[in-house]
Amino acid sequence: MELTLENPAILQRCLRCLQDLSATAFVEATPRGLYFQALDDAKVSMAQIEIKSSGLRNYKFEVPGNKFSFGLPLKAINGMLSCMGTHDTLLISMSKPFDVLHMHNANAKDERKVSGTWELKLSDVDDERMGMPLVDYSAELLMPSDLLRQVVSSYTDSTSLMVVVNGAERWVEFTPGGQKLNSDGSEGPKKGTTRLRSNPDAADGVVIRRSPATPLRVNLACQFLTAFSKANQVAARVRMFLHPEVPTRVRYEMDETVQKITGFLQFFLAPQATAATETGSMS
């Protein structure tokens, strides 16, 4: 397998988000491209990256069975990719027995970055690609990824965040739940609700693309939402799909004309328990 990656910094930004969930990513390579998957230990959240072969220059895949999978150590790969800039060209190759990843930074254009060759030992995996069932989500939001990052980052002292979508009145609310405790056992200052008005004509605002007849409420773990929102460096806009009984989906599309990669980064997060419900999982 061989490929040329023209913007390795984007791949690192994606993989850093996976590293917040797990130390190792499951990777599956096929003629259609590359698929990455990571779950947290409790299987409450999952991250997926899919990079299409059509968006990879010089993609060659000649493997019996038309697919193979391996475990990718995220800390190590992110350390190597941090040596590369957005304008560098990264050559990646693997050969039998597919247990070592070879990478070469062909033309480091930023003098602060490193030009060189790396080899990364891969691990065997027993995992399989985890497909998510098709869901008719109750609500869909579209917003600038920087806006989601700004809102979620203001509630890092909270353990949960209630997302309320009111389609009739055209607004979305983010309300913090429990507060993290200080070192002396006391709660920190509570922060208020953030309400965003839906405005399809505002490029910097939220748009409610779909909503139920009555207000929708979904309680989500703030820890994972904060990790997901770091993908604002991957794509300019983000879509959120919400349903009270199934995992919320947060999706960032990668545009080849901008990121030089065709594909997506998406996250799933099971709803958190409230007084009337139980915490869900990815399984």
Image (spheres, rainbow, N blue to C red):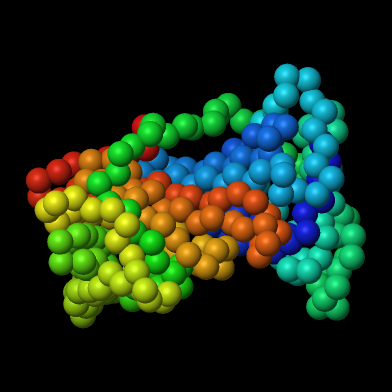
Q: Quadrant of the C terminus?
A: top left
x, y percent for residue 198: 28, 69
Tell which residue pokes out farthest to the left in this image.
276
Is residue 72 rendered to the left or right of residue 153?
right
Residue lying at 78% horizontally and 69% vertically, measured from the top left: 87
Instruction: State the count of labels.
Output: 0
Quarter of the image holding residue 239? bottom left
Q: Is residue 204 above or below residue 225?
A: below
Task: Name the foreground residue: 100 vs 254.
Answer: 254
Quarter of the image holding residue 258? bottom right
Quarter of the image holding residue 32? top right
Can residue 169 be seen by looking at this rendering?
A: yes
Task: Name the foreground residue: 80 vs 244.
Answer: 244
Residue lying at 42% horizontally and 34% vertically, measured from the top left: 132
Residue lying at 79% horizontally and 25% vertically, measured from the top left: 63
x, y percent for residue 202: 38, 76
Is residue 103 rendered to the left or right of residue 18?
right
Tell which residue pokes out farthest to the top in this image.
65
x, y percent for residue 38: 52, 44
Residue lying at 81% horizontally and 72% vertically, measured from the top left: 113
Q: Quadrant of the N terminus?
A: top right
Can residue 150 be seen by looking at this rendering?
A: no
Tell which residue pokes out farthest to the front in this image.
201
Is residue 177 rendered to the left or right of residue 100?
left
